Image (cartoon, rainbow, N blue to C red):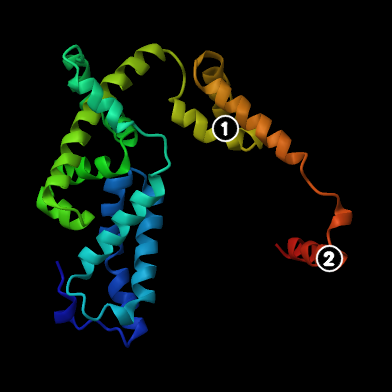
Amino acid sequence: MADVTSEGWPAADPESAGALLAARGPALVRFARSITRDHQRAEDLAQEAIVRAYERRDELTDVRDIDAWLRRVVHNLAIDQVRREREFVVDDVEGRWMSDDYTVDTAAVVTAAETREEIEDALLRLPAIYRTAVVLHDIEGITVREIAELAQIDLPAAKQRLRRGRMMMVSALADGHERRVALRGVPLRCWDARSRVSDYLDGDVDPATAAALERHLETCPTCPPLVASLVGVRERMGGLRDADSVVDPALAERIRAALALA
């Protein structure tokens, strides 16, 4: 890793600081992608980390390893972003593993682990802190001690995250196999369908995609209630529009002028 002090961290030179940080962009995006499993989100996180470093460049003159600092920022931003996502309940997974009766279909799990799509799906179902530990250690080859330093936790806590994350991965792959069997023959994966619903409602998908989405909704047991809820909320929100009379005429005129220029 680059030693910023030896390079001469150009805090007083905004142009040089910007160039130094921009050069780290591709590696930072790859690191963020390994955590989030989402390229667009990874690009956003990397950009946010670089912007923060640039804005605080005068405070970073004593930082000897800017790469580690940037990775820590990305890591923390990623954790904050996904805390509210739908994730495995840790206690539930550990409870299952503590039961002598709990087991999985080894062949199905190992076969699923050979498929990138299944791995991606399982990883997205893990809580962020456990997903990060598994990805960084088992995919990226980062040691547990380095993970502890990155997450600013002690070594036992990092080991616990890795242990729990691995257990959750197995359970997620096992559950994913059961879902695949239940949804066999249903066009589109659920996330592929759900991620297109908004555009579908706005009439902004091509006919082939619209047809596939409609077929999915006809046969999927879980997506129709979600889509119906989206439609219902959209309709209710449309009814909340205030009458033009409550908007200040001068403000309304500025809004119309802005829209005309857009």
Image location of residue 44, percent across then percent down? 41, 56
- Label 1 neighbour load within 10 Å: few <14, some 14-19, many 20+: many
Image location of residue 217, percent across then percent down? 55, 19
Image location of residue 209, percent across then percent down? 54, 29
Q: Is residue 232 above or below residue 218?
A: below
User: Identity of the amino acid at label 1?
Assistant: Val
- Which secondary structure lies at badge 1? helix
Left or right placement of residue 253 versus residue 137 in this view = right
Q: Residue at x 57, y 22 (%)?
A: 225
Residue 134: mark: none
Mark 1–mark 2 Cα distance, whole angstroms, equals 34 Å
Left or right placement of residue 230 versus residue 55 in this view = right
Q: Nearer the viewer, residue 164 or 119?
A: 164
Residue labelled with disc 1: 197
Q: Is residue 130 above or below residue 105?
A: below
- Label 2 neighbour load within 10 Å: few <14, some 14-19, many 20+: few
Residue 149 sits in which quadrant? bottom left
Residue 112 sits in which quadrant? top left
User: Identity of the amino acid at label 2?
Assistant: Glu
From this viewpoint, is residue 29 visible? no
| Quarter of the picture holding the N terminus | bottom left
Residue labelled with disc 2: 253
Q: Nearer the viewer, residue 119 or 74?
A: 74
Residue at the far bottom: name it.
Answer: 12
